[in-house]
């Protein structure tokens, strides 16, 4: 079956085979079978109304979606169960968010890029081509750097990182990272041994770096690039204002970026037993870590205190965009944005759900984490809110850093 072809569950039929032995008369057949059939259908109808079983004749459609890290939401078994109540199944094709934006998506019902730049590329192009497009913003998840306690404490010794208050008592899970000092150490080609990592029981002569996915395909890498560019702006503007500035900024920050791992594998590598040796600091999303800790706590009755988060003191607000490409996709977007059960499940998966105004909705995530005995990261930080570069200039920096063509900015989008 081709991607994008609508798949509908066949309606079940009751097949009755006549017995050649003639042991049952037609009258006996009717007396015995019809009441049983009525009972089965009545029972199925009752179960359907209760929400525990779909009616046997309901049609279930399978929607095709393409996305990166937000697939964590749709691959969750509880989300799948809730969507089945609305007669929807989801089939996901994994792809970096920027790759979603620059490839053909005509065979999909929806896409879910993890940030606004990729979303703007998609919606702009769809609008320019007079194609169906509708955007929903159900939740957000900040960019973080995931690392291990020995590395976080080494950065703390060097006054590059500071524990968040009450984030794990004697073993904090969350640290605030001074991006300026961190990038200065990278720019000076400092090694972990230079900062004294050996004092925490680890030998590592490698250079200090944060591993990101390929910037040419991943929103998290593109967002981290923008954060690096903002922090290392020197005497210039906060963000590039011209093509020349964008190209110069791209060349300046290229040595500070370490790429390579596929987007889908970065966090999986981090939580693997080999992660500490492969990439001790990785670019990730907050929800991935919070979900991991909640699951670890549920399974082992304790926290994984060896894996911790670094929150950059300068922070972008990433804006995942669910983009419906047809009316079926729009129905799904409405559900995940407004259905109370799906909204709660998104929060349980570590996302910060949004209210109708686009603001983070209350402190549900804090309460959930407290109930699961997971320390709550500071939700109201006074960190600097940095501005993303205009799409044209971000694409030019991505092109320079990643050595890939810049995406064409659709007409009508800010340049």
Image (cartoon, rainbow, N blue to C red):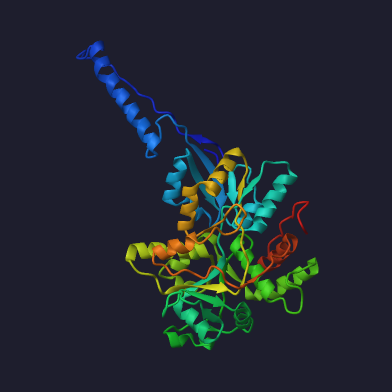
Seen as rendered, the residue at the extreme left is: 23
Indicate the position of residue 325 as horizontal and vertical percent values. Answer: 63, 43
Please report the residue visible at 31 percent of the width from the left and 28 percent of the height from the top: 40
202 to 78, vertically: above or below: below
Quadrant in the rendering for residue 198: bottom left
State the residue in front, 277 or 130.
Answer: 130
Indicate the position of residue 278 as horizontal and vertical percent values. Answer: 48, 72
> Relative to residue 267, is residue 132 drawn left or right?
right
Indicate the position of residue 220 as horizontal and vertical percent values. Answer: 59, 63
State the residue in front, 199 or 287.
Answer: 287
Q: Can see residue 268?
A: no
Indicate the position of residue 324 as horizontal and vertical percent values. Answer: 61, 45
157 to 230, vertically: above or below: below
> Relative to residue 259, is residue 123 drawn left or right?
right
State the residue in front, 124 or 139.
Answer: 139
413 to 32, vertically: above or below: below
> Relative to residue 90, is residue 12 drawn left or right?
left
Please report the residue visible at 37 percent of the width from the left and 65 percent of the height from the top: 297
Seen as rendered, the residue at the extreme front is: 362
């Amino acid at each position: 079956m081709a991607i994008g072809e609508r798949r509908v569950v066949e309606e079940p039929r009751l097949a009755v085979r006549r017995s050649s032995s003639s042991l049952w008369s037609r009258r006996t057949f009717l007396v015995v079978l019809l009441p049983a059939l009525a009972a089965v259908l009545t029972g199925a109808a009752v179960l359907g109304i209760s929400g525990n079983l779909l009616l046997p004749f309901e049609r279930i459609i399978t929607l095709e979606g393409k996305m990166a890290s937000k697939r964590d939401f749709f691959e969750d078994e509880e989300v799948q169960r809730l969507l089945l109540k609305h007669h929807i199944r989801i089939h996901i094709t994994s792809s970096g968010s920027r790759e979603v934006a620059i490839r053909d998506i005509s065979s999909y019902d929806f896409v879910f890029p993890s940030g606004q730049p990729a979303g703007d590329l998609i919606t702009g192009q769809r609008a320019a081509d007079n194609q169906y497009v509708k955007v929903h913003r159900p939740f957000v998840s900040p960019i973080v750097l995931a690392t291990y306690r020995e590395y976080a404490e080494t950065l703390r010794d060097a006054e590059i990182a500071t524990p968040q208050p009450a984030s794990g008592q004697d073993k904090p899970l969350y640290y605030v990272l001074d991006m300026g000092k961190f990038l200065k150490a990278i720019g000076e080609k400092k090694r972990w041994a230079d900062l004294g990592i050996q004092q925490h029981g680890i030998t590592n002569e490698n250079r200090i770096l944060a591993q990101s996915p390929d910037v040419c395909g991943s929103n998290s890498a593109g967002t981290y690039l923008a954060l690096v560019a903002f922090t290392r702006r020197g005497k210039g503007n906060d963000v590039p204002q011209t093509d020349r500035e964008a190209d110069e900024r791209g060349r300046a920050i290229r040595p500070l970026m370490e790429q390579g791992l596929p987007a889908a594998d970065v966090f999986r590598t981090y939580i693997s037993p080999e992660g500490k040796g492969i990439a001790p600091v990785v670019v990730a999303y907050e929800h991935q870590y919070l979900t991991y800790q909640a699951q670890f706590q549920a399974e082992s009755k304790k926290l994984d205190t060896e894996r911790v988060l670094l929150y950059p003191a300068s922070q972008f607000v990433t804006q995942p965009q669910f983009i419906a490409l047809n009316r079926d996709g729009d129905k799904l977007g409405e559900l995940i944005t407004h259905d109370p059960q799906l909204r709660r499940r998104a929060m349980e998966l570590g996302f910060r759900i949004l209210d109708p105004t686009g603001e983070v909705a209350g402190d549900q995530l804090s309460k959930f984490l407290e109930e699961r005995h997971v320390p709550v990261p500071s939700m109201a930080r006074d960190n600097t809110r940095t501005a993303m570069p205009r799409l044209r200039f971000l694409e030019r920096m991505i092109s320079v850093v990643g050595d890939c063509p810049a995406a064409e900015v659709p007409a009508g989008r800010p340049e």
